[in-house]
Amino acid sequence: MTEAAVTEDRNRVARPEHVPASLERDIDMYALDGIEEGYHEAWKALQTPDMPELVWTPRTGGHWIATRGSLVKEIYENPDRFSSEVIFLPKEAGEKYAMVPTRMDPPEHTPYRKILDSGLNPAQIRKVEADVREAAIALIEPMVARGGCDFAAEYATVFPVKVFMAMTDLPMSDVPMLAKFAMDMTRPSGNSPEEMAATLDAANQGFFAYVEPIIRARTGGSGTDLITTMVNGTIDGQPLAHDKALGMISLLLLGGLDTVVNFLSFAMIYLARHPEKVAEIRDDELKLRRGVEELFRRFPVVSEARMVAKDMTYRGVELKYGDMILLPTALHGLDEAENDDPLNLDWERKTINHATFGGGPHRCVGLHLARLEATVTLQEWIKRIPEFSLAPGARPVYNSGIIASVHNVPLVWPTA
């Protein structure tokens, strides 16, 4: 069988009886049509006037997709109807995902979330701002005289990871292994749900094996790093159970090694293609700081799912317990019903609606760190490289999945 045929057959299942034929669409979240022109553009192309707000695809094991921002927001905010018991697709892979507390619903989820918040709340993030800035400057300064770099490879995949590894007191030498685990979880390889599940499970167990001795070494410790802070937290007055600590610290690493990395590259591609947008914030510090939220609206990278918690009719559509619904966060921030002229980056946008950080009880715990890293990157980059563009003929390579990625982002700029 040719590679094209394998791709064509991958993950395709028969439409269930409760799904009307009129709602079936052939959409592969791991291989979006038109993605060579851009990840966000590929998702946005689905929001045509005749596209139903909830559609079903036979791909990736078969699942629903929310195509409008209002649904993405509503489903995130209603865990009683749309459970986090399974959040990754295909469902067979999501059932192997064992990190804490992302697979929990309230009230079980709540005390674990408090532990995560204890290390990543705004007060804690303010304490590391100087270190974050120092890390950005150390990477940018040597690039200035060169007149160019591959932003994805030389900055985006390095800067947030260096910051995160310092906050967790882990060696940078471990990053390649951990980054491979992260990729295998968020973009698992395989030509069937079962193969993708095996890939994800192996990566999940790889995280567990890595953090197990670290947790044991830091339990009872007095360090101030993120891992020590979290493993010594309590649940209802009791020490955090070891199996739950494995899931929580693994989640911490997964979130710290993949999301901001890819967001920064998507944002920089746009700015390199729109020098007028850079000019607007070059000498306006207030506009830059306020505009960071607009960047997050424009360039979300997450497409996770929720499981239907009970048989119901939702928005006129029959859903069955166990059905999966994909929530592409791009389809919230890029929906005209949520934001006017959504593909345009408007630093002065007054009302910004997006689900880039998710929503409801599982809203991303790392959002304050992500905002700081994005702000510092803009400040320190533009201060030293005020004008830049994509290299002639550059063709960034986009990949979709649970977390989207992009590589090959060659930037050039004039040198003194």
Image: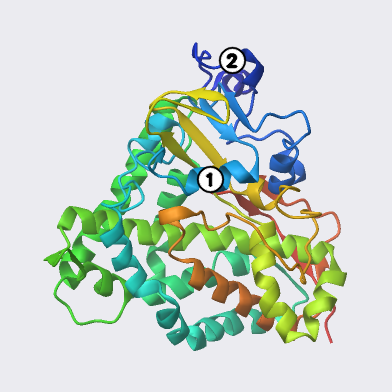
Q: Is residue 192 above or below residue 208?
A: above
**Residue drawn where x is 81% and y is 54% of the image:** 341
> Between marks 2 and 1, how big is the CA–CA gap?
22 Å
- Tell me where residue 169 appears, x and y as whole percent: 33, 75
Q: How is the image coloured?
A: rainbow
- Tell me where residue 185 appears, x and y as whole percent: 43, 45
Mark 1, other Cα within 10 Å: few <14 / some 14–19 / many ≥20: few
Direction from residue 280 to residue 238 in the image, left or right? left
Q: Is residue 411 above or below residue 337?
A: below
**Residue drawn where x is 70% and y is 48% of the image:** 40
Direction from residue 341 to residue 150 in the image, left or right? left
Residue 74: mark in rendering: 1
Direction from residue 148 to residue 93 in the image, left or right? left
Residue 20: mark in rendering: 2
Direction from residue 46 to residue 273 in the image, left or right? right
Nearest the viewer among 361 and 299 is 361
- Tell me where residue 12 appears, x and y as whole percent: 53, 19
Q: Is residue 326 above or below residue 102?
A: above
